[in-house]
Image (spheres, helix red, strand yellow):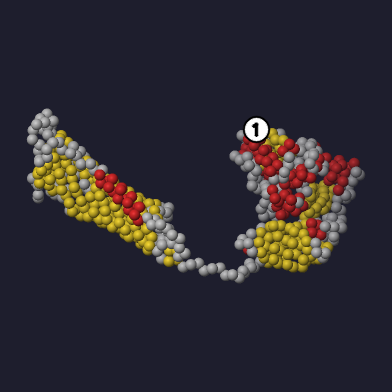
Amino acid sequence: MNITTNNIKGSHTVRSPFNLVYKCIIFGILMFMGFQAPISAQEVQFTRPSWWFGAAAGANLNFNHGTTQQLNSSLTIPAAFNKGFGAGLYLGPLVEYYRPGSRFGMMLQGGIDSRRSSFNQITTPCNCPADLSTDLSYLTVEPSLRFAPFKSNFYLYAGPRFAFNRKNSFTYQLGINPDFPDQTPTPEVNGEFSNINQRLISMQIGAGHDIPLSSQNKKVQTMLSPFVSFHPYFGQNPRSTETWTLSTLRVGIALKFGKGREIPPATPAPVAYVAPTVGFKITSPKNLPSETRIVETFPLRNYVYFNEGSTEIPSRYVALEKGRIKDFKADQLEVFAPTSLAGRSQRQLMVYYNMLNILGDRMVKNPSASVNLVGSSEKGAQEGTKMAESVKQYLVGTWGIASSRITTEGLSTPRIPSKKQGGTRELDLLLDGDRRVSIESSSPALLKEFQSGLDGALKAPSMVVPEESYVTFEVDGAMEAFKSWKLEIKDENGKVQHFGPYSAEKVSIPGKLILGDRPEGEYVIAMVGQTEDGNTVRKETNSKVVQWTAPTTMEGMRFSVIYEFDNTKAIASYEKYLMETVAPKITKGATVIIHGHTDVIGEEAYNKNLSLARANDVKSILEKSLQKAGKNDVKFDIRGMGEDQTVAPFKNNLPEERAYNRTVIIDVVPRK
């Protein structure tokens, strides 16, 4: 052991531990500025390296804890030191391995690790101040597991620290009693600690962030990585005696270099264009006079139902872009179907979901007509007004209807509510039916031909069943091959009609739109598809198109009327419809099948009676009209189906489906 004493005149000067911190920060900035190279654009691209080699430098912020009094066998100081702080330099090489885009990797650092510090000044029994500074230094090896939680440049790391002591000196200074300023200063003592642990095993945990200094145009790539790590006190006991421990916070920066592998240039796409393979099939109507047909006129409910908590028109209603309204045709609604639709109930809903487009089309054609939109919401009249304004905005913005032709108002409950005062059961379904915008109009052009007044429903187009009355165009594989496709139909005189664009694989167009008033015609029909990359695919075929005509003897007609919730009496407009439209079409000796239905709200037995009462209400109205016309031999088949979902016209998931299930369906079968 060597002890060196130096006489110091005057008071003892305390060394600042922050000088090394400043030096490390300046060193890191110089490294960043010195190694940052300009990035030049090159044609060759390289992968990000997996192996990185470099060096790390930083400042160790060391915190002392515990007791230190017997410095060595020759020096035991009068009082114990307990706490302290200092900064030391860390410098050493590093190696890292991690695959680009992966979460896990490995790190290895090693180098000179200074744990120098100064203890807080104490006062000895002689009322003299005492200072102790240490100069501990280690050679360390620090393997770590690297983890990038987001597969990004941010990473965490943790692992053991193996330290080998290389320096363990101290400086002790006993100061002068302030009560005796003239006494001779005690010499400064420089020595080495005894009982030093030559090997330490501790741990570290830290975080870092990689900052690329070069692009992937360079084979040798550079990375700058600021980092911070914490070395807790356990395992860091400098001596085998007393209780002195160290906790360290390391702040630093690493400069790393790696070599990427050259990325082969992409093979250029072939010049020759290969058109996608698609099928093209046309099915024209066939006239079978002996086939059983039913002509059905669907009623159209004048309500738009809104989702809970929203004042926007639900997405299930068909919303057209402004540029497509010129293509809208009420008798071609298959083109504007919101989802895959098939069968009677789905075809009726397809018409219903186009209700706002039917209304917009008719308001364009009838410029004197006006409507009142009444929104109702359980959240209050203000919310109902917002709902009505959403419908108005669509009619004004898309269909160009003058704002002055549309008035709006808001209610907390609709004029004809489903939720009655004092009701306690199935309130959520009832509220779904009352959360709506009602379309009111006194303009006959917008209403059914048999209705008038503010409670009238919208005029609905008649639909003809079956679907074979349409010309069907099938383009097998269109959804995968094309962005969109259209039809060019040229007749014998060279006149060309254009239909589309479409995105579905199957489209049906009424034959009358193609033929006009002609019974049949020979056409050259071309399908023109547009691919995503801008190429055009054209397929042509010759086809004969036949105008569908109804059989000379119609086997039956179907009509429907809709009832309000829990109501057994048809509104006045429907009563007029039954008397003036349906009854005259019932021939002598015919059979009239009347089936009543309800939704699923309420008790099953109650709904059974309710549906039968509705059917009898329709029968009573028709019977009176038939007796006046002298048709006394008409037979009636009356049934109440209730809420039976096996025969219900619609499902009961949505409020509009439940509204359409509150119906009476009338089938008129002529006497053979």
Q: Is residue 38 visible?
A: yes
Q: Left or right? Give the position of 471 relative to 204.
A: right
Q: Label 1's element?
A: helix
* Residue receiving disc 1: 381
> Does residue 605 appear in this view?
no
> Considering the image in quadrants, where does the C terminus appear?
bottom right
Residue at image x 9%, y 50%? 1
Name the residue at 25% across, 49% down.
89
Question: Which residue: 20% across, 51% down?
Answer: 137
Across the whole image, how many numbered discs are drawn on residues?
A: 1
User: Crowdedness of circle 1 by 10 Å Cα count: few (<14), some, many (20+)?
Assistant: some
Q: Quadrant of residue 534?
A: bottom right
- 661 w.r.t. 280: above or below: above
The residue closer to the viewer here, 398 or 615, is 398
Nearer the observer, 433 or 637: 433
Residue 155, percent from left and from top: 38, 52
Q: Which amino acid type is shown beneath numbered disc 1?
A: Ala
Q: Classify residue 228 as left or right of residue 72.
A: right
Whole-percent x and y of residue 300? 75, 45
State left or right for residue 48 relative to residue 119: right
Q: Nearer the viewer, residue 209 or 105?
A: 209
Residue sitting at 16 percent across and 41 percent down? 132
Place of residue 591 in the rendered image (x, y in percent of width and height, measured from the top left): 83, 50
Identity of the residue furthest to the right in this view: 630
**For this view, does 652 lie left or right of residue 365?**
left
Q: Position of residue 482 (x, y in %)?
A: 64, 61
